[in-house]
Amino acid sequence: MITNKKISLESSPIFLDCTLRDGGYYNSWNFSQDLAQEYIEAMHAASVDVVELGLRSLKTSGFQGPYAYTTDEFLEGLSIPPELVIGIMVNGSELASPASQEAALNALFPLPASEAKFQLVRIACHAHEFRDVLPVASWLKERGFMVGFNLMQVANKSESEIVDLSKAATCYPIDVLYFADSMGGMSPEDAVRIIGWIRQGWSGSIGIHTHDNLGLALQNSLRALDEGVTWVDSTVTGMGRGPGNAKTEELVIEIQERRGNSVDMVPLMQLIRKHFKPMQNLYGWGTNSYYFLAGKYNIHPTYIQEMLNDSRYNEEDILSVIEHLRVEGGHSFDSNILETARHFYRGKPKGSWNPESMMKAKEVLILGSGPGVECHKSAIESYIVRKKPIVLALNTQCSISADLIDVRVACHPVRLLSDCKVHTQLPQPLITPISMLPEEIKKLLSNKNTLDFGLKIESGIFEFGHHFCTIPTSLVIAYAFAISTSGGATRLLMAGFDGYGADDPRSLEMQSLLSFYQSNSKALPLLAVTPNKYSIPTHSIYAL
C-alpha cells in the first residue's frame, strides 16, 4: 500500500516518467535548466504521477551534468508543482558493500524525506547485488521515503531465481518491486511469465521498465498492466540507454484511456518539438536493426550505443561485435570486451603461407579504397606496367585493371562474409587468416584460392613471423603492412589513402597506426603516391 498522500491510488496505474535519468546516458545528464523546467510542467499537464529526475551518485570521475547527482541544493532551484512526486535513482552497486553501506547512505541522503524535494528512491540492482542492498529499504523508510527496487536483466533468469529474489524482498518495506527488460529482448508473453514468477514470492505492487530493441516496449508495458502491474515507466520520445524506452507521448494516451480522463498534451508535444526531436537527431536513440539483434541475443544495449556513437565502427565492425557477443555473452557492458570483440579471430595465430615466396626483395604497392586510386588510375597503371611492383588490393578495391593486381588482402570476418560472393568472382588469390575464421566463412571461400597468413590482435604490438603476424588493430592496412614486412619487401607504396575529416576519429586511428608501424625497427619505408592527409613521406605517382 502506498501511504504517501501525493500519489492517489485512484490514478492507478501509477505513471512514472524517467526521461532525465535514463536519457542522461546519451548526454551525460547535462540537460539545461530551461529544458528541465519545461519538462516538469509538461509532465504535470500530462497527468504523470512521478518524475524520476535523475541519479544520485558518489562517483565523481569525469564530467557529468547535474542530473547524474540530483543534489538537494540543485533541486531547490527547480519549481515543482506540489501534486507531482519527484523520484531519484541510485545504482545498487554503490550500496552493495555491507561494510560501507551506511556511510554511503548518509552521504547520499543527508536530508530526511520531510526536508527533501523528492519522495521516492528507486534502487537499480542486478540479481547478484539484490540481497546485499535490500537492507537499504529499511534505512530509507525510517527517513520517510517511498522505496522502489528495480531488478535488472531478469529476462535471462530462471523461475527459481526470480521467485527466490521476490521472496527475499517481502522481508523489507518496499513500496514497489520493478522488473526491467534491460536487454530489450522481452516479448509480451515473457512479461506475463515473469510477472507470474514474481507473484509467487511477492504480493506487493509490481512495476515494469521496458526497452525498445524489438519495438515492443509499449506493447510489453500495456500487457503488463493487463496482468496487474500497477507502476509503469516511460521517457519522452523514448530517450534512454540504447534504443530507449516506451514513449511517454504514446503511453500517456493509453493511460488516460484506462483512467477515463483527459489530459493536456500540448506542453508535452511542444517540449518534443523544441527540445527532444533535435536531441534525437543529434544522438540517434531509437530502435534499429543493431538494437534488434542485441535484444534478440540478450546483449547489453550500451555496446550498440557506444559503437553507433563512434565513427571508427563501420557496419562490419558492429555486426562482428554482435556476433562475438552472441557467442561469448554480453549481458554486462565492458569497454574492454567491446574493443577485443571487434577483432573476432579465434585461437592461437597460425598460418601455412609464407609471403617471402611472393615479396622477397620486391617493392609492394598497396591499393586502398580512397578516391585517389580512381582519380589517378592511368598513372598508377602506367607505374605498375613499368616497374612491376607486387600489387596488393585491400578487400574488393577494383579501380585498377584486374590483370594488374597480384593479390587481395582481407582480414575482417564480417567484411569477408559480406564480400564472399565478390571474392569468389575476383581472379586474384586472397591473403586472409582463413584457418582462424568462422566455419561459415571458410565454407563460402572453399573454392577460392586463399593464402593462409595467420593473425593475432594485441594492443601495442607489431610482430612479423613467417606464417603469421601480431598487429595492434584489425584494420586491413595493418595486416597488409605485416604481410609485406614478413615477406621481406623493400618498400611500401600507398595509393588511395586519402584520409578522413580532421575531426573524424578514424583519422587519428590511422595516423596512430602509421606512426606506430614506422617506429618499429623492422618497418619498411612508406611512401604515399596519391594525395593523403597523413604524416608520412609523400611523392607524386607522376614523378616516380
Image (cartoon, helix red, strand yellow):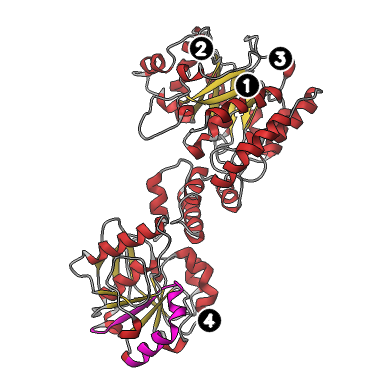
**Residue 279 x, y percent position in the rendering:** 57, 41
Residue 83 is left or right of residue 451, and the answer is right
Q: CA distance from mark 1 to mark 2?
A: 15 Å
| Any part of residue 211 in sight | no
Residue 9 numbered mark, or none? 3
Q: For the residues marked 3 and 1, what is the alpha-carbon distance in whole angstroms? A: 13 Å
Q: Tell me: residue 169, above or below residue 414.
A: above
How many marks on residues?
Answer: 4
Disc 4 marks which amino acid?
Gln
Q: Which residues are magenta?
A: 361-386
Alpha-carbon span between mark 2 and mark 3: 23 Å
Residue tagged 1: 50
Q: CA distance from mark 4 to mark 1?
A: 61 Å
Q: Residue at x 61, y 45 (%)?
A: 286
Q: Residue furthest left?
A: 521
- In the figure, is residue 355 to the left or right of 106? left
The x, y position of residue 325, in whole percent, is: 47, 50
Precedes in sequence: disc 4 or disc 2? 2
Front residue of 208/385: it is 385
